[in-house]
Image: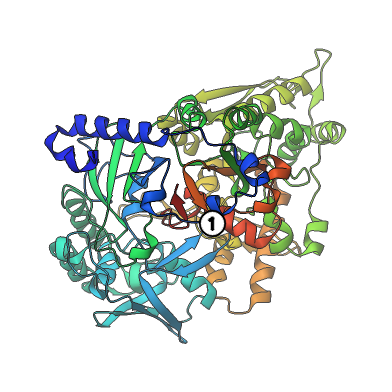
Amino acid sequence: MNLWRKRKRLPAMCAVSAVLGASILLSGCGASAPGLVDRLNAGDVNDLQQPVSAEQLRYNKDKIFHGLGGWPKPPLYQGNPFGSGGIGDTNNRYMYEGLFFFIRSMNNVYNLLAESSEESEGATTVHLHRNVKWHDGAPFTSKDVWAYYRLNNGAEVTKYLTSIEIPDDYTVIFHWMNPAPYPELRKLLLAQDLQGQIPYHIYKQYVDKADALLKEAKPLTDKSKDGPFNLDITDELSKKIALNWNEFTRSGPKIPVGTGPYKFEKVTTTDMLLDKFEDYWRPNAVNYDKIWLKNVPELSAQYALIKAGKLDWYDGTPPKDILESLLKQNKNLLHYRMFDPASVGLMYNIRNQPFENIKFRQALTYVLDKSKLREIGNYYGQENPKISMTGIMPSSLSKEVDASVLDKMTDYSHNPEKAAALLTEIGWKKGNDGLWHDPEGKVPSFIIGAPNNWAPGVNSAQIAAEQLTKFGIPTKLKAVDSTIYFSNADKGQYDMSMDWVDVSWGFQNPWSSMRVLFWQGTKTKVGFPNVKKKDAEGNEVDTGKLDLKVKGIDGKIYDIDKEMKRYPFVQDEQERRQIIDNLAWIANENCWGVNFFQNTTGAWINTKTMAGHYPMMDEIVKYDRDMPLATDPEDQLAITHLNHGFNSTYMPQEYWPR
């Protein structure tokens, strides 16, 4: 019986439950499969690595891909990915596509909706595939790409464009500002967007309204300002554009319409079903007929599903004891570790005394023993005891920063004696009670804030608080609900704040990670000052523009905002490297925060239900399925393909049901 064909006779909730229950039973039917190591020792490699016919499928006869996801609870779930509540990150990966596909941890960019592209002095020309359809059957054309950026004109790349030309249905020409960003950066800027999200034929009225409003704007003459398509968006015009955008986010189809390999079928609070899109333009890339996703927020419940073999694929590396237990209890599981381009760390709030004093910040940093912080926060992470916070992932430092500059950076390795000397130098004294007294004779106490649902941050912050307290500086952890923590931290309500530091959420380019430090999340938690200006009534208002001028490695004073803004337009690679060298040195020297450790994440495969070209195949027996960090670039790339969070879009096209 094909339960999938009978689902429409059942109420929605019952259909989901019946189908998912059947799929679980099917995934476990038949004789128990030998463990992965046993099969490799027996030379049973082809069975693991080759797709098989439908008649030969043993454990996943319905060809259902089982995974986890997250989405707004119905009825908040809707078809507009930009709307309130949205559709959830999961749908972006299965249902939507961009011109390019990129692996964010390695900067590998591939053509996707773009068949090809070429660069000229001031333009990037993209040629689209001609047989792409939206899920409702309408053709995907260059008008849709144009619509994406005219309506979604807050997209970052629009700050570097003057216009988008569409000479025919399958050609898009992006015209860059003069000077244009250097060529390698242009494609990265375009690759971070999912341009196949705003079908023009559905959202025509809002796209046309946005286009008309943009045409009212004059060319931008003030180079210190940013505007889409190099336009000067006045406050009045900005309000109109925002109103149109808000109306757009409340409109649209009830279910998502994309160009991706899977179409929306059903959603409940806990389950989502997606169907293979029969008219998908790359039919040979789709190996599963269905996608079944479970929304399971609790880690313990996720681990239970992994152990029971109910998932084909899972992202993440749990604590050491849990990882080893899962592998021991299910011999078909295979785990790969991989570096995360993000570090767990602490930021000092320089708005509060005495954190505005660099020597005080340095003293606290010398107190911290990073090996202990890493062991409790992420056993498999990588610590760099010498740095404070540089804006660059530790694993990329030697690649992105010149060795001579690294040698000149202040070494912050654990050194309580040096911490004590610095505190004494700025007038602090240690009393008979073992506590440090400030220059006024007081014993201050400090708070480290952290989101309470982030285990690596909370656990390592607790150890940091204990280390500082033991040294004689009373410190407590305040774990706060994540719904309010980040707002509180940005407002400076904690002396120190936990978050991802030395991180890039987009492409791996040192400038991209420096933006997090100087322009985005780290900036607000550290409390970097902004430029102020007078409004029409004479009131002082915050412009949001960074007002940070500090001494560089050569002793000169640098305006950080200007350095960050000029970087994309510097065509000479050596000059760009010098900018990054200087900014990394400045960040480390000023000690605005502490990089506890670079996170290590990972990916799991259930080898009983999924076949494919597993990376590091010849080493699986040696490591008994617990694979170490890969050193070979090809293995590293293959492993990053396994982790949803490292792909701008995703589908299990390199693996097959068994």
Q: Position of residue 198 (x, y in %)?
A: 24, 61
Q: Position of residue 576 (x, y in %)?
A: 63, 71
Say left or right for 369 vs 320: right
Residue toward you, 283 or 529: 283
Residue under numbered circle 1: 515
In this picture the colour scheme is rainbow
Residue toward you, 150 or 135: 135
User: Which of the 4 image quarters holds residue 233?
Assistant: bottom left
Q: Amino acid at mark 1?
A: Arg
Rendered view: 580 above or below 167? above
Rendered view: 447 above or below 599? above
Rendered view: 544 above or below 449? below
Say left or right for 556 vs 610: right
Q: Position of residue 243 (x, y in %)?
A: 19, 54
Q: Position of residue 187 (x, y in %)?
A: 47, 72
Residue shown at 37%/64% (left/top)?
284
- For the N terminus, the quadrant is top left
- Within 10 Å of disc 1 (Cα), the crowding (few <14, some 14-19, many 20+) is many
Q: Residue furthest bottom?
A: 121
Instruction: Name the secondary structure under disc 1.
Output: helix
User: Which of the 4 image quarters holds residue 261?
Assistant: bottom left
User: Which of the 4 image quarters holds residue 4?
Assistant: top left
Mark yes or no: residue 305 visible. yes
Residue shown at 63%/56% (left/top)?
636
Mark yes or no: residue 495 visible. no
